[in-house]
Image (tube, rainbow, N blue to C red):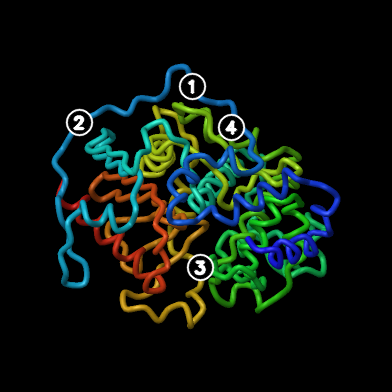
């Protein structure tokens, strides 16, 4: 990071570093190299050393069982008429963990790039799908009203009055149709998403950041991916329940799953979890989440989230993407409520996606779950084509198990 960038950041954040926050400066420098090719693998397994974090103490003394039943998986796949080996795919996409589960048992499990099974790996936007599950569980139990999807955000979050969220509903932010102006380009230093990352490093409030955003379009006009929409879901959960996100997630999602390891959440400097992308878990614990969804919300005989919410949240329901985002050879991806849906889903396919190669793929037709972590610095290649490449591989694995 050069001095001009540091000065810009200090100015944008109210001069906080000028007052001597050396720890913030160190975090800022680390965040600036977070995605560097030679550091990304280590960084993604060590976020607790790079940012404000909180550990959610909820690992089970007797974790839920993930039995092993090894199967031979395909060694190559075909995409756009070309065949590539699975090994080359993992190299090209800088995969660090690849876990395949069939009929509830681990069929194949591999850890690469010097990482191991106990690494706590950053989710990035896969965390959004977890927040959707939490909201569903709270609605199932009456802790959030059933009609809350129609609530105007500003009626419960007065700090958002006059912001880009004024006029949007809870359902709008669930479907990424808030209409808020937000630049999500991870490769643009000055984008809103990178501004937000620097705020997390130096110090600041995510609630205030959300309230600072303006309007781009009318709510529900187009699906336009705005990561901060997920933070606003969390703000609504806090407002409607009077409770904090960490304890709620432990009680209603994580503890019932019987996790092997305590999850870690990146937080802002006020301790608020970065729910739109800051979850860190082992790959097997991510797979437990996906298996619960595959099983229509049940896990070890317990209904964690209702089948009704699973069906509603994982169905295509958002309007189409902005027209300029749809011009890719394989077509646009659909969107539900914090879940991605293939354009032509086969047998109820759905997946959670995090930048740089994080995937939770769920295929009910073949009773298969695939959890992948990675440090794919070329994830933007082809403006969305990588998601389709990964989908092709995951489908072909599922079909051939």
Q: Position of residue 269 (x, y in %)?
A: 74, 44
Q: Which residue is mark 4?
A: 250
- Measure the C-alpha gap from mark 1 to mark 3: 37 Å
Question: Which comes sooner in the sequence, label 4 or label 3?
Answer: 4
Q: Seen in the image, is 103 located left or right of residue 122?
A: left
Q: Are marks 4 and 2 in contact (CB under 8 Å)?
A: no
Classify mark 4: helix, strand or loop: helix
Q: Which residue is mark 3?
A: 318
- Measure the C-alpha gap from mark 4 to mark 2: 29 Å
- Measure the C-alpha gap from mark 1 to mark 4: 11 Å
Q: Which residue is mark 2?
A: 69
Classify mark 3: helix, strand or loop: loop
Q: Position of residue 71 (x, y in %)?
A: 15, 38
**Viewer-nearest of labels 1 and 3?**
1
Q: Position of residue 20 (x, y in %)?
A: 82, 47
- Measure the C-alpha gap from mark 2 to mark 1: 23 Å
**Viewer-nearest of labels 4 and 3?**
4
Question: Which comes sooner in the sequence, label 1 or label 4?
Answer: 1
- Measure the C-alpha gap from mark 4 to mark 3: 29 Å
Rendered residue at 28%/35% (across/down): 104
Question: Which comes sooner in the sequence, label 2 or label 1?
Answer: 1
């Amino acid at each position: 990071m050069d001095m001009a960038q540091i000065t810009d950041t200090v100015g944008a954040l109210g001069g906080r570093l000028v007052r001597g926050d050396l720890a913030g400066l160190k975090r800022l420098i680390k965040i600036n190299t977070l995605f560097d090719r030679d550091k990304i693998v280590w960084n993604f397994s060590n976020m607790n050393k790079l940012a404000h974090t909180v550990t959610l103490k909820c690992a089970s003394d007797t974790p839920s069982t993930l039995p092993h039943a090894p199967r031979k998986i395909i060694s190559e796949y075909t995409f756009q008429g070309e065949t590539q080996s699975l090994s080359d795919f993992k190299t090209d996409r800088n995969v660090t963990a690849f876990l395949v589960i069939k009929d509830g048992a681990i069929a194949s499990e591999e850890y690469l790039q010097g990482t191991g099974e106990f690494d706590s790996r950053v989710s990035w936007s896969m965390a959004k799908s977890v927040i959707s599950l939490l909201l569903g569980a709270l609605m199932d139990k009456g802790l959030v009203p059933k009609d809350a999807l129609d609530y105007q955000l500003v009626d419960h979050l007065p700090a958002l009055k006059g912001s880009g969220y004024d006029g949007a509903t809870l359902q709008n932010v669930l479907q990424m149709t808030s209409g808020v102006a937000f630049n999500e380009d991870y490769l643009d230093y000055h984008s809103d998403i990178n501004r937000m990352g620097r705020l997390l490093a130096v110090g600041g409030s995510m609630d205030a950041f959300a309230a600072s955003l303006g309007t781009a379009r009318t709510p529900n006009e187009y699906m336009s991916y705005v990561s901060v929409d997920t933070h606003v879901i969390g703000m609504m959960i806090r407002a409607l329940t009077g409770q904090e996100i960490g304890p709620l997630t432990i009680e209603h999602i994580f503890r019932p799953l019987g996790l092997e390891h305590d999850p870690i959440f990146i937080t802002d400097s006020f301790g608020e979890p970065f729910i739109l992308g800051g979850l860190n878990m082992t790959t097997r614990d991510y797979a437990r989440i996906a298996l619960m969804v595959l099983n229509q919300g049940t896990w070890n005989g317990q209904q964690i989230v209702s089948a009704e919410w699973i069906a509603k949240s994982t169905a295509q329901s958002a309007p189409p993407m902005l027209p300029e985002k749809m011009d890719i050879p394989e077509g646009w991806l659909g969107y539900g409520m914090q879940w991605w849906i293939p354009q032509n889903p086969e047998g109820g396919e759905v997946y959670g996606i995090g930048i740089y190669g994080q995937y939770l793929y769920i295929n009910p037709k073949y009773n298969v779950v695939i959890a992948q972590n990675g440090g794919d610095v070329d994830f933007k290649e082809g403006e969305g084509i990588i998601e389709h490449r990964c989908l092709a591989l995951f489908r072909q694995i599922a079909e051939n198990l």
